[in-house]
Amino acid sequence: CLLYNLDFDLEKERSGLDEQGLKIAENQETSQKNRRRLAENTRDFKKASPDDKLSLFNSLLKSYQEEVDNLTKRAKFGENAFLNIYQKLYEAPDPYPALASMADQDQKLSELETENRKMKLELEEYRAESAHLKNQQATIRRLEERNRQLEQQMEEKVREMVEMKQRSLAEDSQKTLEALKDRERALQDQLRQATESVKNMQKLHESAQSQLFELRTQSEEDRTAKEAEVSLLMDEVERAQSRLVSLEREK
């Protein structure tokens, strides 16, 4: 973890992220302006006469195609920015920042998908409105193919991120399992040591009890011997007194 923090230049990454964030915000603002302009041009086109529609079609179609290209660039920029920071954070001990960033990127991809679906619906309406302009069908097909490719790229990116999430979660689960096994082994060692300690204490207790019993037995034997010795001495004293009395009488 320490080596990772030393290698990871946080200030530099923050500066890069600030630049990317400003670029993303700028792209979003530009996209909103372009969509409002497209909406106005589309309304003007729908209100125009058939003859005017022929003259307006090329410029309007070009505007749609440019917006699709801009969305493609915006999506690629966002994906590259995300993958750049994700690859740098992937080896971090704590996966939470990467997962949070992935969730945020998922939201952005979802928003892009929503925008593309809206764009597709507008293109469908536009194609229905301009069905009589047969000479533009090839261009419309190319535009639809571009939109399909963009959707396919997004699906692939989403699938890649899901796979990365699954791998990250699997690695975390394996680390947790290994930690639990280590903890179980440590607890088993502690239990074994405690059991051995209890056995040793039991042996010491039994030895102390045995020594105490021996001391008590020895003390009883010594007291009995002393009492016998005192009794003998008393007997001798009594005999001596009796003899003294007898001698005095004999006088």
Image: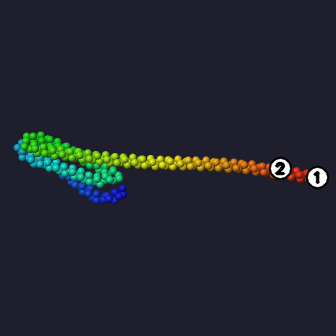
> Element at badge 1?
helix
Quadrant holding the C terminus = bottom right
User: Which residue is at the front of the view, 166 or 132?
Assistant: 166
Residue under the image location 28 percent in, 53 percent down: 87
Disc count in the image?
A: 2
Which mark sits nearer the N-terminus, 2 or 1?
Answer: 2
Q: In this view, does 121 lie to the left or right of 223?
A: left
Residue under the image location 19 percent in, 43 percent down: 117
Q: Mark 1 points at which residue?
A: 250
Q: Position of residue 61 (x, y in %)?
A: 11, 47
**Could you give the CA–CA distance between mark 2 and mark 1, rounded to whole angstroms?**
22 Å
> Does residue 64 appear in the picture of this structure?
yes
Q: Mark 2 points at which residue?
A: 235
Q: Is residue 7 left or right of residue 233?
A: left
Q: Is residue 46 left or right of residue 163?
A: left
Within-10-Å neighbours for mark 2: few <14, some 14–19, many 20+: few
Instruction: State the scheme by which the image is colored.
Output: rainbow
Quadrant holding the N terminus = bottom left
> Element at badge 2?
helix
Q: In this view, does 11 lie to the left or right of 115?
A: right
Residue under the image location 7 percent in, 41 percent down: 134
Residue under the image location 15 percent in, 44 percent down: 144
User: Which residue is at the front of the view, 10 or 126?
Assistant: 10
Identity of the amino acid at label 2?
Answer: Asp
Looking at the picture, does residue 177 appear above or below residue 2?
Answer: above
User: Which residue is at the front of the view, 207 or 150?
Assistant: 207
Q: Position of residue 113 (x, y in %)?
A: 22, 45
Q: Where is residue 227 in the image (x, y as percent from the top left)?
A: 77, 49
